[in-house]
Image: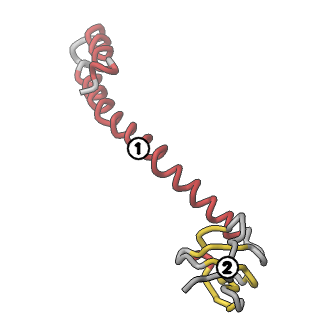
Amino acid sequence: MFDWFFGVSAALAETAGTVGEATAAEPNSAAALITTLLPMALIMVVFYFMLIRPQKKKDKKVKDMLSNLKVGDRICTIGGIYGTISGLREDNVILKVGEQDIPIVLARWAIRNVEAVSVENEGDIIV
């Protein structure tokens, strides 16, 4: 299938023609092996650069963000709750939420991101 593209079998066939009839079967089997494995190897390389590598970068960024949390950071949880960190434990985070600073205990993995700018008008909630 890829013989025309890589020219592997043509080069091996020429080499086999000069060596003799007895060794002609070995290069053809090598060419078949190369043309079979080369597309699979290319697919694996494409998957690595398009799927695996970007996911590892994203996971590393999230891990760094969770390890750099500190008291006073304004965060957003995966549930959409905005709060200010008032305490940190090993696997838990204590948030102050709302006008009355109600404490909520969350798991660290439930934090989506750290807000760079605090949310304005938190007390002016219209019901």
Secondary structure, mark 1, is: helix
Q: Which mark is residue 44?
A: 1
Query: Where does the image place residue 5, in percent across and percent down from the top left?
Result: 31, 20
* Side of 19 where 54 appears, left or right: right
Instruction: Name which residue lies at 62% across and 59% down.
Output: 60
Viewer-proximal residue, 79 or 48?
Answer: 79
Q: Judge whether 7 appears above or below 123 on screen.
A: above
Earlier sequence position, callout 1 versus callout 2 = 1
| Residue 47 visible in the snapshot | yes
For label 2, count other residues whose C-alpha is less than 10 Å away and answer few (under 14), some (14-19) or many (20+): few
Query: Where does the image place residue 37, in percent across and percent down from the top left?
Result: 33, 36
- Which of the image's four quarters has the N terminus? top left
Q: Amino acid at mark 1?
A: Met
Viewer-proximal residue, 16 or 78?
Answer: 78
Of circles 1 and 2, which is in front? 2
Q: How many marks?
A: 2
Q: Which residue ends up furthest to the top in the rendered image?
A: 18
Instruction: Name which residue lies at 67% across and 68% down.
Output: 114
For label 1, count other residues whose C-alpha is less than 10 Å away and answer few (under 14), some (14-19) or many (20+): few
Viewer-proximal residue, 86 or 92?
Answer: 86
* Side of 101 where 52 appears, left or right: left
Q: Judge whether 41 appears above or below 125 on screen.
A: above
Do the residues bearing badges 1 and 2 touch, measured as CB atoms within 8 Å?
A: no
Instruction: Name which residue lies at 68% across and 72% down.
Output: 119
Instruction: Name which residue lies at 66% across and 83% down.
Output: 92
| Residue 94 visible in the snapshot | no
Distance CA(mark 1)–CA(mark 2): 49 Å
Indicate how the structure is coloured in the image: secondary structure
Badge 2 is on which residue? Answer: 122
Secondary structure, mark 2, is: loop
Query: Where does the image place residue 58, in percent across and percent down from the top left?
Result: 57, 57
The image quadrant that residue 111 belongs to is: bottom right
